[in-house]
Image (cartoon, rainbow, N blue to C red):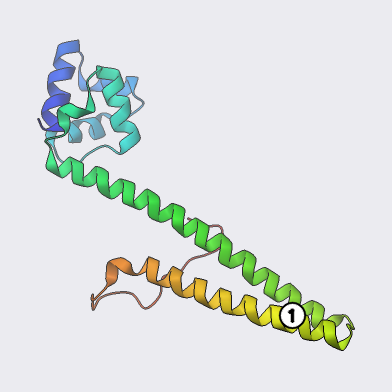
Amino acid sequence: MKLSEVLVSERHKVGKIQQNVAGDLFLTRQSFSNWENGKNFPNIPTLIKLSNYYVFSLDTIKGDEYLMKQVKKDYELINLKKANKKYSLTLTVLLVIIILMAISISIFRFSIPVTKFLTIILLILSSVLILLSYKFLKFVYKDYKGDKNAPLWVPKGFGMV
């Protein structure tokens, strides 16, 4: 059964108008109307709120293929954002460590063996940074494989989602 049909029938069962249901769920009437008309779909948390409000199982809308694709896309987007945060944090921490080590080698007077050891560690960390950056690049661009309109780079500011 399609989500729009379920929403209309459940709303009629409880005898409420769109405005009342939207107010109860802290939504706009226009959003709710669009869902009932099948123009677009709610996000996953709102879908769960709707099923709790109307007391219906989400299995009843399992046959709505477009909605299921939308839910799957939402989950993929959530997982992608989590992975992006993980990679971004790892790369940033690694870069800060490399910069601090390079500065400390140039500022402080270490003995020659210590300087050589720190330089080797610095080279290893730089290699790890390059490999992780490459993996991050492959992960971000996996959806653009073979696409001629793929962007050259994806701008990302630290701390922004």
At x 73%, y 83%, the residue is 119
Q: From the top left corner, tell me how far across and down residue 19 is, in percent.
A: 25, 22
Mark 1: few/some/many CA within 10 Å (<14, 14-19, 20+): some
* Residue linked to disc 1: 102
Against 24, is 3 above or below?
Answer: below
Q: Nearer the viewer, residue 58 or 32?
A: 58
**Is residue 15 at least partly visible in the picture?**
no
Q: Amino acid at mark 1?
A: Ala
Against 105, is 143 above or below?
Answer: above
Q: From the top left corner, tell me how far across and down residue 97 is, in percent.
A: 69, 70
> Does residue 94 appear left or right of residue 77 in this picture?
right
At x 22%, y 39%, the residue is 41
Q: Nearer the viewer, residue 28 or 81?
A: 81
**Is residue 80 at least partly visible in the picture?**
yes
At x 39%, y 55%, the residue is 80
Question: Regarding mark 1 in the picture, which secondary structure is present there?
Answer: helix
